[in-house]
Image (cartoon, helix red, strand yellow):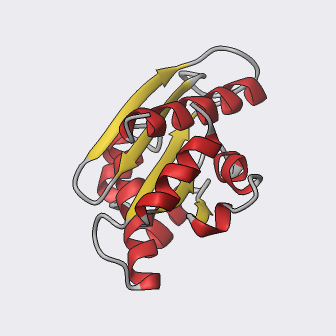
């Protein structure tokens, strides 16, 4: 599936897309925004690399961060829910009008385990989180996370 097909489907359905990115640092949003006409669907992206910003901008619970760590399914899900709420509130949209995608992980070279990442999708009803265990250089891991997120969103949309 392609980003173009995802954008076309979302535009046809009237749904909007918003991103919360940590490991991908804006690369995921860029994959969509680089396509002409993306502004009809894409609301924006919050790059929340620091845990403090995950709390301040996305409303991620500090206790969850402390207990589970930034690289966890729980934090990825909370990031997706948080950025979805930001998009809905900013544009006075209803629940279900916005699909949020969040990425968090460790691309290395330090820390453990390098290559572990999570992609979360929140559609206003439920959160779907996928754990990734990737290999490669820092940039390869980040790119693989973007590819996995696009694939997961396509699957979520039935493409």
- The x and y percentages for residue 129 are 35, 37
Give whichever of 149, 104 is nearer the camera.
149
Quadrant position of residue 93 = bottom left
- The x and y percentages for residue 145 are 60, 31
Q: Quadrant of the C terminus?
A: top left
65 left or right of 52 in image? left
Residue at x 44% of width, y 56% of height: 100
- The x and y percentages for residue 125 are 22, 55
Labels in figure, total: 0
Give whichever of 125, 72 is nearer the camera.
125
Residue at x 60% of width, y 68% of height: 40
Residue at x 49% of width, y 71% of height: 57
Residue at x 41% of width, y 32% of height: 155
Residue 80 vertical placement versus 76 (above, below): below
Residue 35 visible here = yes
- The x and y percentages for residue 56 are 47, 72
Q: Quadrant of the N terminus?
A: top right
Residue 23 visible here = no
Give whichever of 49, 44 is nearer the camera.
44
């Amino acid at each position: 599936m392609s980003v173009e097909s995802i954008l076309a489907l979302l535009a046809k359905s009237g749904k909007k897309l918003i991103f919360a990115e940590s490991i991908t640092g804006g690369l995921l949003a860029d994959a969509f925004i680089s396509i002409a006409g993306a502004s009809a669907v894409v609301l924006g992206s919050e790059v929340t690399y620091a845990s403090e910003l995950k709390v301040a901008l996305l409303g991620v619970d500090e206790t969850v961060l402390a207990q589970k760590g930034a690289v966890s399914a729980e934090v990825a899900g909370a990031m997706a829910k948080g950025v979805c709420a930001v998009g809905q509130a900013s544009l006075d949209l209803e629940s279900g009008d916005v699909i949020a995608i969040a990425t968090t992980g460790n691309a290395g070279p330090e820390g453990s385990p390098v290559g572990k990442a999570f992609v979360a999708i929140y559609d206003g009803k439920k959160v779907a989180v996928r754990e990734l265990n990737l290999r490669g250089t820092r940039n390869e891991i980040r790119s693989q996370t973007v590819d996995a997120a696009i694939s997961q969103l396509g699957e979520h949309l039935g493409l």
